[in-house]
Image (tube, grey):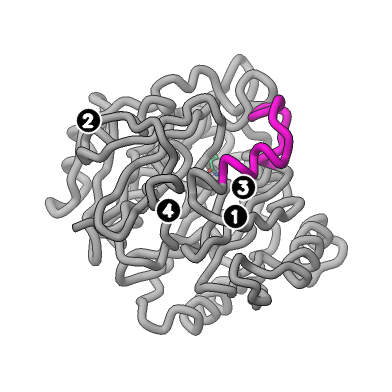
């Protein structure tokens, strides 16, 4: 693996849309006891279901610690590759490489990672093992790497259409804990150079109480060029209402990189999902403080799905909105199977199915 000093745009590489063909997907086995109940016992079952659903149509690699290696190997079917790799937690979307392609070859982009805000408002310390993962994964897959370690970005904070457009949120990318010395314009230039896009659509915010400073992958996702799904609620008394409304207004007045108007499909959220006392009991403390408090609202959204070669793997929350969400996704992805996974045990960690997966585009 070599480190390349130019940029993907200069070399004719760019990030493809998630629905374009994949070689595979990377995930990380969860075990952190202040993120996941009972040391990850329940979360591992949900992660395994996600991995198996994805492995039906592409190669899945799961990274596990030395301590969890044997358990991961035993829980996951043989077609899923398990490799030992250390990490601080299990958010492959955020710190596995963002892969870019020129149509033949792929390369990785290694962004800097500081646990969603470093010492300003980050979610844990240290994060050094996570931050090394992109490099290790480029080595593992034998792919050259663009190193942008001085620029903090998580994979969950961007979505692209593969045709020159990126969507992101100001709440996240302009947050004080990421790149406080860079202006919005300078941040946009990094996105354009390293994803190879010409247009960045800035939503103001994401999902209410999303501890990532409101990653875009929980509020809005491209489903095809010039079409997105947007997490929505009709309940005007819910703080999510104004947040989703603001996104809708921006999307309705924006055009994409090709000048097309954007069609917005409202993907209605479940009723507010809150963590129970019992669930909180299963979580270890962090710095002598509880990591979650009973009644705390979790950032539940159906937008946090993963598009594999053959399926859309989506979260279910045991809510009446589950089925309508599944039907909407089925109508938008008629060639793919829609695979729902009961995702409460992933949500408790602070993210969902998109956050725990990272696609690797197909290469020749
Ligand atoms: O991408 C994500 N949604 C990660 C959230 C991290 C939460 C740590 N508890």
Q: Is mark 3 within 8 Å of ligand 1?
A: yes
**Mark earlier in primary sequence (2, 1):** 2
Residue 328 horizontal/vertical position (percent): 55, 80
Tell me the element at label 4. loop
Q: Quadrant of ligand 1?
A: top right
Left-right relation of 322 to 269 = left
| Nearest to viewer (mark 3 / mark 2) | 3
Report crowding for label 2: few under 14, some 14 to 19, many 20 or more residues within 10 A (C-alpha): some
Can residue 351 be seen here? The reply is yes
- Residue 240, quarter of the rendered image: bottom right
> How many numbered badges does the structure rendering display?
4
The residues tagged by marks 4 and 3 sit, at their Cα atoms, a distance apart of: 21 Å
Query: Is residue 134 shown in magenta?
Result: no
What's the mark number on residue 108? none
Q: Nearer the viewer, residue 19 or 81?
A: 19
Question: Which residue is drawn at the image coordinates 34% and 32% (left, top)?
Answer: 4
Label 4 sits on residue:
14
**Mark earlier in primary sequence (3, 2):** 2
The residues tagged by marks 4 and 1 sit, at their Cα atoms, a distance apart of: 23 Å
**Residue range (magenta):** 172-191
Label 2 sits on residue:
84
Question: Which residue is drawn at the image coordinates 51% and 71% (left, top)?
Answer: 223
**Mark earlier in primary sequence (4, 2):** 4
Tell me the element at label 1. helix
Label 1 sits on residue:
218
The residues tagged by marks 3 and 2 sit, at their Cα atoms, a distance apart of: 28 Å
Tell me the element at label 2. strand
Report crowding for label 4: few under 14, some 14 to 19, many 20 or more residues within 10 A (C-alpha): many
Query: Is residue 188 shown in magenta?
Result: yes
> Does 269 sit above or below residue 178?
below
What's the mark number on residue 215? 3
Q: Nearer the viewer, residue 192 or 65?
A: 192
């Amino acid at each position: 693996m070599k480190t390349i000093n130019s940029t993907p745009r200069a070399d004719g590489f760019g990030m493809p849309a998630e629905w374009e063909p994949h070689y595979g997907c990377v995930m990380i086995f969860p075990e952190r006891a202040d993120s996941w109940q009972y040391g990850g016992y329940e979360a591992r079952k949900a992660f395994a279901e996600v991995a198996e659903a994805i492995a039906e149509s592409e190669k899945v690699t799961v990274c596990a610690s030395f301590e969890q290696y044997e358990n991961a190997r035993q829980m996951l079917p043989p077609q899923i590759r398990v490799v030992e790799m250390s990490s601080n937690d299990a958010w492959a979307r955020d710190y596995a490489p963002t892969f870019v392609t020129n149509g033949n070859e792929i390369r990785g982009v290694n962004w800097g990672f500081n646990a969603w805000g470093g010492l300003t408002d980050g979610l844990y310390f240290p994060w050094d093992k996570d931050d090394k993962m992109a490099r290790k994964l480029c080595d593992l897959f034998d792919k050259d790497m663009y190193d942008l370690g001085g620029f903090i970005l998580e994979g969950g904070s961007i979505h692209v259409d593969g045709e020159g457009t990126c969507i992101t949120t100001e709440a996240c990318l302009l947050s004080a804990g990421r790149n406080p010395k860079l202006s919005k314009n300078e941040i946009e230039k990094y996105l354009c150079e390293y994803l190879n896009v010409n247009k960045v659509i800035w939503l103001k915010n994401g999902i209410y109480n999303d501890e990532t400073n409101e990653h875009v992958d929980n509020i809005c996702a491209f489903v095809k060029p010039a079409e997105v799904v947007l997490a929505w609620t009709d309940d005007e008394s819910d703080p999510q209402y104004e947040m989703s409304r603001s996104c809708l207004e921006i999307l309705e007045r924006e055009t994409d990189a090709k000048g097309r108007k954007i069609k917005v499909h409202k993907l209605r959220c479940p009723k507010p999902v809150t963590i129970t006392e019992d669930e909180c009991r299963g979580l270890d403390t962090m710095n002598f403080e509880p990591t979650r408090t009973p009644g705390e609202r979790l950032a539940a959204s159906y937008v946090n799905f993963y598009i594999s070669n053959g399926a859309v793997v989506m979260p279910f929350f045991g809510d009446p909105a589950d089925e309508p969400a599944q039907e909407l996704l089925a109508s938008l992805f008629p060639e793919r199977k829609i695979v729902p996974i009961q995702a409460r045990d992933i949500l408790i960690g602070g993210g969902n199915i998109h956050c725990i997966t990272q696609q690797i585009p197909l290469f020749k």
